[in-house]
Every structure is written in C-alpha cells, then in structure tokens.
Amino acid sequence: MSSDEAAPGGLPLEGELAAVAARMSGLLLSRESVDSVLELIVTLAGTTIAAADGVGVTLVDGEGAFVTTSASGPLVREADTLQYELGEGPCLAALRERSPQRVDDVAAERRWVRWCSAVARSGLRSVVTAPMVTGDGCHGAIKLYATIPRAFGAADERTLVRFADRAAVLVANARAGERAGRFSARFKDTLRDRDLITLAKGFLMGRDGLDEDAAFDRLLALARACGGSPAEAAARLVTPVREG
C-alpha cells in the first residue's frame, strides 16, 4: 500500500529528505561528475521511498534526446526502453509536460495503452515520476517502478517532486561544472598554442631577420607544407631551441 499519511506539519520522510539535501550539498562542493551525481540520485531515491522496486533517471541530452543514464536494475531499463521505442509513457509525459505523473495500476490505466500493455507482461504494475526542472530547462526525470499495484500514493508523489527539485539543481550544477572544465581545458590549449606561435615567430625573426608579419607568414607556409596547424608547425620549429 502507498504511504499517504504525512507527518504533522510536513511531508512524509522529512528527516530523510533533509539528509538527502545535506548529502547533495556535499557532492556539489566536491564537484562530482554528472554520472556520479546520477548514481547517487538513484540510490537516494530508492531509500527515500521504500516502496520502489526499481529506480532510474532519464536524462535529456544536449540534442534533446532521452536516455536512461542510471537505473537500479533491468526492470527500469526495460520499461524505459519501451517508452523510448513507443514514444509514450509516464516518464516521457513528465518530461514533455514538466509535471509529475503517477500510474496506480498499468492494468487499469487508460493513458499510454501500448506501453502499459507491454510493461504489464514484465511484471511492472505501478509508477511515479517527476521531472528535474531548473531555470535552464528540463534536465530529465526520476522514476520509481513497483511490481504491485497502488505502490505509490499522493504523499510519495509530493516527496518525489521535492526530491526531483533538489536533484535538478544538482544535475544542472554538475553539468555546468563539466562544461566549465571542458572550456578551461580548451582555454589552456589556446594559451599554449598562442605561446608556441609567439615563440616561433621570435625565433624566425632572430634567425632570419624577419619582421613580425613576415615571420608569421613564414610559419603559415611551414604549416601548409607539413599539413598541420600553425601551432603544430611552431612546436616542431621551437622544440630543438627549447630542448637546447
């Protein structure tokens, strides 16, 4: 049966949710990767709402495609794969409508008839899912699956929505951190290339008596002759000088 009775003055499992928030804050400080974040979300969601037999995260990638990036078992992956193949289901609806969705019993559900019929054969009976939304958009959704009907109630849905809200911020920050890391690496590469080119130009100016523009033209000609970039040509030119 679902856990519809909330504690006075708050949602059920309020203490657990506070602990989840604290653990998520620590993860933000340690700058974990998106994959690690999602694995933690799956683990915490499963322990926060104990009625779940399977927990998973569907992530919206940079091109708007849906992919199950974390799943607690084959039940989740099979149910998600069927949604992606059929183009219907509660998780996809949560993503598209940016609102939670709950199925009390797939055998009686009149929405997503093809998906419900397919997953009923795998033993899945009830679902609750909530989107992970921030000001940057919808990053994905958390979904809980159970093998008994009416495993989740309104209180579980509210709890999962609060959990998804916290998880959305975590995923958004983790993604921003990874983007910043990639940008930082590219920026360092750009600075290194610039320094190599500057050094190579200086070498050509001193060796051949060229001005700066002529030295750069000479470097471009070397790059074309070698079929590489100016930075690669510069590296080949100055390496003997730097090693000497």
Image (cartoon, helix red, strand yellow):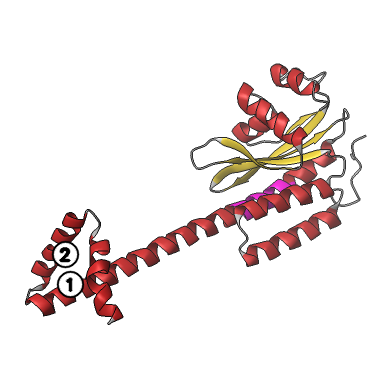
Q: Is residue 95 magenta?
A: no
Quadrant of the snapshot with the C terminus: bottom left
Between the residue at mark 2 and the residue at mark 1, the CA separation in whole angstroms equals 7 Å
x and y, in percent, of residue 240 in the image? 25, 76
Q: Where is 236 relative to 86, above or below?
A: below
Which residue is denoted by mark 1 in the rendering?
201
| Bounds of the magenta segment | 162-171
Q: Which mark is residue 85?
A: none
Which residue is denoted by mark 2 in the rendering?
219
Regarding mark 2 in the picture, which secondary structure is present there?
helix
Regarding mark 1 in the picture, which secondary structure is present there?
helix
Q: As drawn, is 89 to the left or to the right of 209?
A: right
For this rendering, which residue is in front, 37 or 3?
Answer: 37
Q: How many marks?
A: 2
Q: As drawn, is 196 to the left or to the right of 206?
A: right
Q: As drawn, is 32 to the left or to the right of 220?
A: right
Q: As drawn, is 213 to the left or to the right of 187?
A: left
Q: Is residue 164 magenta?
A: yes
For this rendering, which residue is in front, 232 or 161?
Answer: 232
Q: Main secondary structure of the magenta part?
A: helix
Q: Are marks 2 and 1 in contact (CB under 8 Å)?
A: yes
Q: Residue at x 63, y 21 (%)?
A: 86
Q: Residue at x 30, y 66 (%)?
A: 193
Q: Where is 244 relative to 102, above or below?
A: below
Looking at this view, name the residue that lies furthest to the bottom: 244
The mark nearer the N terminus, 2 or 1, is 1
In the figure, residue 16 lies in which quadrant?
bottom right
**Tag 2: residue type?**
Leu
In the figure, residue 151 lies in which quadrant?
top right
**Tag 1: residue type?**
Lys
Q: Residue at x 70, y 29 (%)?
A: 90
x and y, in percent, of residue 98 in the image? 63, 36
